[in-house]
Image: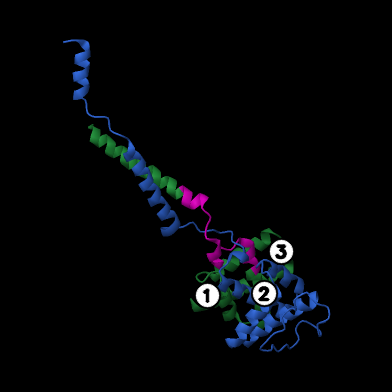
Amino acid sequence: MSQDTHQAQTSSKQAPKRSNWYLLTGLLFGLILGLMYALVINPATQHDAIPANLKQANQDEYRSIIAQVYAATGNLERAKLRLELLEDQDAVHTLGVQAQRALANGNAEEARALALLAYVLQSETNPVFSPASTPTIQFIPTQTLPLPSATP
Amino acid sequence: MTDRTRRLIFFFIAIAAGTALGIALGWGVFPAKSADTSPRTLRIDFKTDYVLMVAELYQIDGDIALAVERLSYIDETDPVGLVNQAVDYAQEHTYAPEDLQLMLTLFSSVNSLLAQSG
């Protein structure tokens, strides 16, 4: 028997060469499992959120507390710095809308505080509306608050 | 070891590697859903400022039960721990003495309230 024939016969008896696609399949399957676990079952929780990252309802509560503190202490600079953390596009408008919502829900004290802060901030940007006196004035919010007029 | 056994072992190793990669991607690379963040995840300086706000209101209204309710916005389960953490942070970062005093007063009152009810 020649060497070539022997090699041919030996080759034909060897198992056919298998692909390694099963490794890729396993890897993909594991990747899907890992992603499901990390994103759905046990997502990472952050511990460095800023107030602007909070859910809308939580932002409203945060804003409400800021307004109540301002109504109690009169510290406008601190209130402004705290409001900036919420990154509202129009803080006066947002405060006004929230005040109306609070009033509609029967939270008169909260509505009063929100409306007061909105009024004082609006007075700062629009000097025509000068504040009456100290920040702790008895301010009764109306059902429809004056919104900042659009600049022509 | 047969060929089939070896392939099976490598298959499970590939699954394990894929899982590890998926977890690393899910936790490290893809950002957390920032629009769905709860107050509990606020950074410590913002938590401290919130506690200060509660302390300021408590100084005015003297309502400790309401103060505890306000603190539950951040931590429902351990308001004392929250205020304690805030006081520690404030002391480390040399907050104004009057602010620190407000928080210490709040801490004392919350502690007393929960000690009485507990």
Q: What element carries label 1?
A: helix
Given this view, does label 2 or label 1 mark the residue nearer the observer? 2
Q: Nearer the viewer, mark 3 or mark 2?
A: 2
Residue at the limit of the structure toward the left, as seen here: A1
- Please give the name of the residue rendered at 60% of the width and 75% of the height, measured from the top-left corner: A60
Q: Give the range drawn in magenta.
A: B24-49
The colour with which the image depicts chain B is green
Q: Let me know if residue B35 is in the magenta part.
A: yes
The residue at which mark 3 appears reads as B95
Q: Chain A is drawn in which colour?
A: blue
Q: Do the residues labelled 3 and 2 touch (CB within 8 Å)?
A: no
- Give the image location of residue A57, x and y in percent: 56, 74
Compute the Cα span from label 3 to label 1: 27 Å
Our reading of the magenta stretch's main secondary structure is helix
- Label 3 amino acid? Tyr
Q: Seen in the image, is A14 located left or right of residue A100?
A: left
- In three-dimensional space, the C-alpha distance between marks 2 and 1, rounded to whole angstroms, equals 29 Å
Judging depth in this view, the residue of B15 and A144 nearest the camera is A144
